[in-house]
Amino acid sequence: NIESELEALPPDQKKKERLIREKPLLEAFWSWAEKSAIGELPKSKLSKAFHYALNNREGFWNYLEDGNCSISNSLAENCIRPFVIGRKNWLFSGSPKGAEASAGIYTLVETAKANGLAPMKYIKYILSDMPRSAFLEHPEYLDDYLPWNPLVKEFCR
């Protein structure tokens, strides 16, 4: 797998390698897809798949141009999955305030995960330390509780 080999490279080098190694493979794929789509029945599932891919070809090229981009959208899908599952549960929050509280906790948990923190440690840290802080008088103190703060990372990993 080419992407596995490139994983540790810095973004500029990853882009260069992708253009050298993966672009020819994608060009061959698009050529094959164009030829193959012609012979398929228009309403078949395979024809629909070919046309979907061909109609979205430009978007599929994006990851080649930016070494920071992933070839996969799994990270985005994994972040959305709990929201989709929770959406039905939130119907039973009891009130709009209850739904807001649920959304707030959900945001804390997902932000912790996205920043490599243990969600329970992060919430415990916030709930135990923040009340002793003077963040109401000094809003800039809130920066001390953001998940990318080095102290938070140290305590909540």
Image: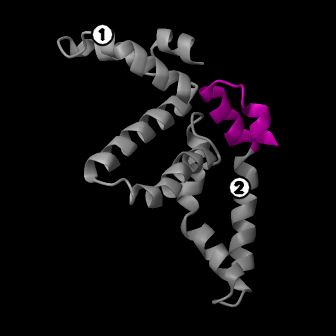
Residue 33 x/y as whole percent: 71, 71
Q: Residue at x 55, y 64 (%)?
A: 56
Which residues, given as a range, are shown in magenta?
1-21
Residue 88 x/y as whole percent: 46, 61
Closer to the eye: label 2 or 1? 1
The answer to whether 100 appears left or right of 157 in the picture is left
- Mark 1 sits on what residue? 133
| Amino acid of disc 1 | Ser
Say which of 59 and 70 sits in front. 70
| Labels 2 and 1 touching (C-beta < 8 A) | no
Q: Earlier in the sequence, mark 2 or mark 1?
A: 2
Q: Secondary structure at mark 1?
A: loop
**Residue 115 in sight from this viewpoint:** no
- What is the residue that sits farthest to the left in this orientation? 137
In the depicted structure, whether residue 15 falls above or below residue 81: above
- Mark 2 sits on what residue? 26
| Amino acid of disc 2 | Leu
